[in-house]
Amino acid sequence: MAARRRNAPVLLLAAAIVAAAIVLTLAQWGVTYFQDTFAFLLDRQDFSADSFFAPHNEHIVVIPVAITKLLLAVFGMTSNTPEQVAMALTLFAAAILLFVYVRRRTDPWLAVIAAALLLFLGSGWSVLLWPFENEFTLPIVFGLAALLLLEREDSGGDGWACLMLSLGVLSGSLGVCFLVAAFVDVVLRRREGGLGRAYVFAVPLLIYLAWYAGWGHEAAHHMTLENLLNSPMYVLEGFASALDSLAGLSTIPINSPGQNDWGRPLLVAAVALVAFGQWRRPGFSRGFWVVSSAAVTYWLLASFNYIPGREASATRYVYAGAVFVLLMAAELLRPWPFSRRALWVAGAVALLAIGPNLAKMKEGGAWEKEQSVLTRADLGALEIARGHVPPTFTLASVEVSGTASLALIEAGKYFEAVDRWGSPAYSPAELEEAPATGRKYADIVLGQALPVSTATTPGDFDAGSAAENCVQLQPGSAPAETQLGPGTTRIEVAPGAPASFSLRRFASGEYPVRTAGADGESTTLLKIPRDRADQPWFLHVEAAQLVRVCR
């Protein structure tokens, strides 16, 4: 019976991980690649040193790039399910390591609560649901492993911790924060272990500096005097946002900047509780200074490179901040025993916090699914136009693609990746069954990529020259739709007011491809290149006079 009670927290953690796996699967069902993922897929296709070591924005991403290349080599690019699975494994590993860290310091049931709060941290949904963000989760996994290994206080533990910190640094800039933690650990334990342990942080630091000298210094940076002066407030906002998110009280929309309404009051309350705890049982543990140094470093580095969109409350920053807050809480709770009633209350509060976070995760998953429809549809249109679209054609225009998530797509690079690893796009048959928004923007992309073009000759209408292959649209009739195939179509407009022409192909109920139209008493040649799909086009004409559409 005693053994069963000891194992109960571990079994509950396992159940929480299974539940998290189900939630992640539901939230990511039907989601494909988008946004910065294409920087890895398209711009790092070779196996050169630059492909691995070039910074993404200003960050080191060696291991994330290596993981992407491995998954592409094994599974191809037709589905991003493999990278979703790989990302889930890092999320579960981070929760398990957090559980171990907290359990060594306080009640194991509190360790389960901490791990569950992290697993279902919907306010950080972009990290949970977007595999590209493993540049956050991998450094956390390696960093937590390093902190646990340092607790062994032997040469073997130090050696493995050095390796973990090196891997963390190669995974993302967040790894630097754990170097600071290791430095503080070495300094605080110098009387016991001496400064000979400095290699634990010195080796990974040298790795980072070597990368910076070779590649990192070329990246754009955003450090300004204003950012430096605002950094203390940014750090406080970071802690406040982490507390707000862990409590399930975030009021920020899933894809918008803003300030959390509850963050600052929660931070004031947390500081008051810490002050009360110090009054009752003064003194901070050595581990508190270790993890606090990492937390402060994290928010300081983020503040130094602040630009709009990188607010302390941004969803991708919340996840790591929550980890640091939970580590600090574990250190502060070391001397405090918890009764069974107190544990029940803590569990109930955690469940209340997880509920709103699950709602946030659902919202984030729904947004990613909308983006995935546009991604598959627009890329499908690009592939249909292949052979006509220039290699430099991009989907950077939101008016064309319907989303900013495809700004990195360049036709030539994309086709090269498709030839190597397969296509994640809708086929023409799948595009016919796609949601309406995807079909609409696929038509717009096709109109630009082929491109569909018109040339109008004014004063060129002959009322008596109708040919057998012409369709006559009488004045006063309802707006007309005429089926077209590839090639050149002649549109003859009788004298009168200007006429408008628009087209659709996969869309229904709307004509998203607009043309310049034509004045009365004119002839327009509409050219539609032959492409890789068999679906016909449909021309929509609005005019107050006779219009002839001739093949």
Image (cartoon, rainbow, N blue to C red):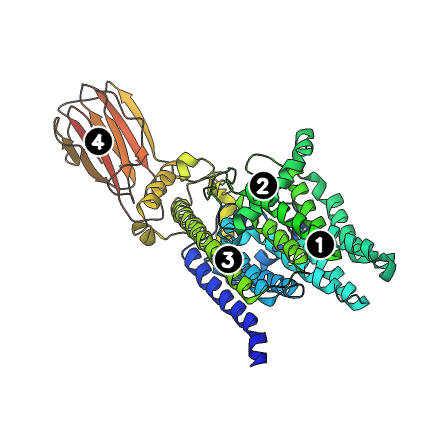
What amino acid is labelled 3 in the image? Ala
Q: Which mark is residue 323?
A: none
Residue at the spot 48% in from the left edge and 41% down from the top edge? 252
Q: Where does label 1 land, which residue?
A: 288
Residue 349 picture location, percent across and down: 50, 56
- Asked whether residue 126 is in view, the answer is no
Q: Where does label 3 land, which residue?
A: 350
Looking at the image, is mark 4 or mark 1 nearer the viewer?
Answer: 1
Crowding at label 2, few (<14), some or many (≥20) Cα neighbours within 10 Å?
A: many
Can you say whether 187 is above or below 192 in the image?
Answer: above
Residue at the spot 69% in from the left edge and 54% down from the top edge? 280
Disc 3/disc 1 C-alpha distance (Å): 23 Å
Pick the residue in front: 469 or 249. 249
Disc 4/disc 1 C-alpha distance (Å): 72 Å
Can you say whether 22 is above or below 268 in the image?
Answer: below
Q: Are circles 3 and 2 on residues that touch, CB within 8 Å? A: no
Can you say whether 7 is above or below 393 in the image?
Answer: below
Q: Which mark is residue 541?
A: 4
- Asked whether residue 113 is in view, the answer is yes
Pick the residue in front: 521 or 344. 344
What amino acid is labelled 4 in the image? Val
Residue 183 picture location, percent across and down: 78, 52
What amino acid is labelled 2 in the image? Ala
Q: Where does label 2 land, which residue?
A: 312
